[in-house]
Amino acid sequence: MKTNIKSSSLDAFYDHKKSQKLQAQQLKIVSVMQPEKVYTRRELAQLSGIETSTVSARVNSMIDTVIKIVGTKKDPLTNKTVEALQLKVAA
């Protein structure tokens, strides 16, 4: 049985925001993300103004619930291949 089906990432984000299930730093990270856009953890740190290590920990706790891994991407600063992240569309 399916319930609370959302048609877009934005709908899912606003539901999480309203439910207050996310911690303040998690909410700050998710709020800088745009639906369908791909980010690295370092990019999210720069956009949110939160340290990269903190963003990494918060993102890891949101993988598969609010954020999904959609492949890899080159980090522009280190030129290393890192995980590419995106807001998760509720199914």
Image (cartoon, helix red, strand yellow):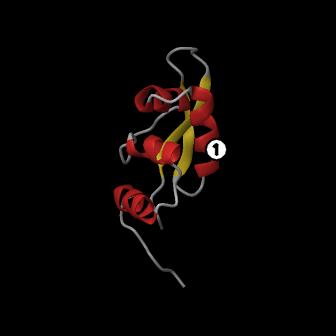
Residue 89 coordinates in the image, percent (x, y): 45, 59
The N terminus is located in which quarter?
bottom right
**10 sits left or right of 29 in the view:** left
Residue at the (46%, 48%) spot, across then down:
27
According to the picture, the residue beneath numbered tag 1 turns out to be 60
Q: Which quadrant of the figure has residue 83? A: top right
- State the residue in front, 57 or 86: 57
Q: Is residue 41 above or below residue 67?
A: above
Residue at the (52%, 31%) spot, across then down:
40
In the image, farthest residue toward the bottom? 1
**10 sits left or right of 82 in the view:** left
Residue at the (48%, 80%) spot, across then down:
3
Q: Amino acid at mark 1?
A: Asn
Residue 43 coordinates in the image, percent (x, y): 47, 28
The crowd level at tag 1 (other Cα within 10 Å; few <14, some 14-19, many 20+) is few
Q: Is residue 9 above or below residue 72?
A: below
- State the residue in front, 55 or 8: 55
Residue at the (52%, 14%) spot, across then down:
77
Q: Which quadrant of the figure has residue 13? A: bottom left
Residue 39 coordinates in the image, percent (x, y): 47, 35
Q: Is residue 49 above or below residue 6?
A: above
Residue 52 coordinates in the image, percent (x, y): 57, 27
Q: Circle 1 sits in a helix, a strand or a loop, which is it?
A: helix
How many numbered markers are drawn? 1
